[in-house]
Image (cartoon, rainbow, N blue to C red):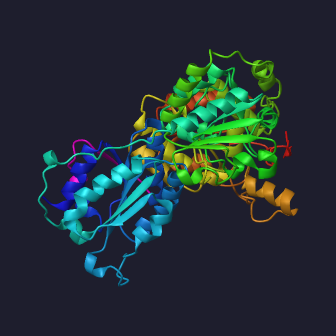
Amino acid sequence: MRVAEVVVKILEDEGITAAFGIPGASINPVYEFLGTSQRITHYLARHEEGAVHAADGYYRASGRMALAICTSGPGATNFITGLYTAQIDSIPLIAITGQNVSAQLGKEAFQCVDIATIAAPVCKATWCITEPSQVPSIVRQAFRVAREGRPGPVLIDLPLDVQMADIPYDLGADAPLPITKTSPDPAQITRAIDLLLEAENPVLIMGGGVLLAGACERFMALAEYLALPVITTYMATGGIPADHPLHVGHIGIQVGSPYGNQFFLGCDLVLGIGNRFGDRHTGKLDVYTRGRRFIHVNVEPEHIGRIVPTEVGIVADAGLAIDALLAEAKRRTPPREPSERVRRIPAERARQARRTDYDQVPIKPQRVYHEMNAFFGPDTMFTTGCGLTQIWSGQFQSIARPYTYLASGGAGTLGYDLPAAIGAKIACPERTAVAVMGDGGFGFMVEELAMACQHQVPIIVIVVNNGYLSLIRQNQRYAYEYEYGVDLAYEGGAPGIGGIDNVKLAEAFGCYAERVTEPGEIRAAFERAVASGKPAVIDIIVERETDASMGASIDAVREFE
């Protein structure tokens, strides 16, 4: 059987049903068999980075892996930003790149670049396969590596001659490799419960690893049994409903809430499960760690103690660790009643919430998120990438369910949002997919509107348009006291801001599009976008120089209105 056909048969057998990519001369043998597959649907991207982001969003929404595929040389190198975005957020996907023939490797032949080496720092593993007979075993291994432990992307580079080779292969004698999960050490579980029961003001941190482990309900059962307050990292948004009585909210120097930061500063013990203690979450470490003891559960041993001093480090799958913690808690104590501090959470959370119900014109950006919270249902999937729009999203959006807030967390990738929303909508066609982005970020992957229109994927893109690279403007203003190179407006530009006419641009692709300038018009625009049944772009013109609340440490966040 030809290797190109073998690859597609294994992809089908591993459960791949969606491929996002761009064909090219060095990958056309595989495309021949993708084209005849009865199980895999191919979606034609317009930029290779967009293909990876779409595969990334597909997994975040559904928990099912997708394929990103492209040709060699600059096509392959365009994968790198998407792979990095997936890797740092622990999103598994399979990336396949075509390559020149094996004899040309290392000879600077046309479009012949060592993509396996280039991509290695931003993938869990990479392979350039030069022996055709190794293809089946390596492709199976790639799926196991992507899924096992801390998930992440993998890349397989296939030279043309390898794709065209014939090898003996029997799918009936082949199968996916088993996936193992790391169980926690019982003594460490016992010690963790000891500390939790002794502490006066303990707090649980839900990290994105809890969602990846499919363990949100079990996490909540643990929190409810011990009446423990819950803080969510940005990547865990939606893992516990925003209005749950134990949910304090986010903490951190950007998306953290005033109440969340204040509450955390009053705790004496922290149990973090499936989190990384990233710098946007912790801020200055001396403030974050002072007076607190830490228990950390993570499937990666090198994450334990890497950022914060850890009294108990538990290397384990998040779901198995939660199961063990809950079982030990039930063995040791009856269900606990919440302390007075914990009982006050709902009232204090509401009292200290930042305001969003502004009525003035130009529209305050906060009002856009206010209207999104009111209009879109709890199953709506939101994607967001970077900038003030992403920070405001983390601060103001109310998310009720896991796998509905699909943000580029660790990378903060401009342009991720639009193709990721396409992937999410393809994975879950019964749900609404909304990309929340700024006008600067909109320009990064705007060409993927063509993928949405060609394949009739009705995503909604909400552009919070202030005519600025506004996060960089804010940083320049307050950190360096200047402004340069961040104004996106120009003479002769679109109405409202004076930059690119996003409405005409979107219509040129075949989208429904409209511009909004009054706060009272926002909801009706959302209604028309949904009713259109097409990919839709709502360009909302907002106040140009609104700043986002942020700071260097969780006790010194500067608030703006």
Q: Position of residue 98 (x, y in %)?
A: 32, 66
Q: Residue at x 29, y 56 (%)?
A: 139
Region rendered in magenta: 33-46
Q: Quadrant of the C terminus?
A: top right
Compared across the picture, whether 197 is left or right of 136 comes to right
Q: Position of residue 503 (x, y in %)?
A: 60, 46
Residue 43 is one of the magenta-drawn residues: yes
Q: Is residue 35 visible?
A: no
Q: Position of residue 444 (x, y in %)?
A: 57, 57
Q: In this rendered view, identify the residue nearer to me: 540 or 1.
A: 1
| 218 versus 539 height, above or below | above
Q: Residue at x 74, y 30 (%)?
A: 199
Q: Position of residue 437 (x, y in %)?
A: 63, 45
Q: In this rendered view, identify the residue nearer to me: 5 or 387.
A: 5
Q: In this rendered view, identify the residue nearer to me: 168 or 455.
A: 168
Residue 62 is one of the magenta-drawn residues: no
- The quarter of the picture where residue 525 lies is top right
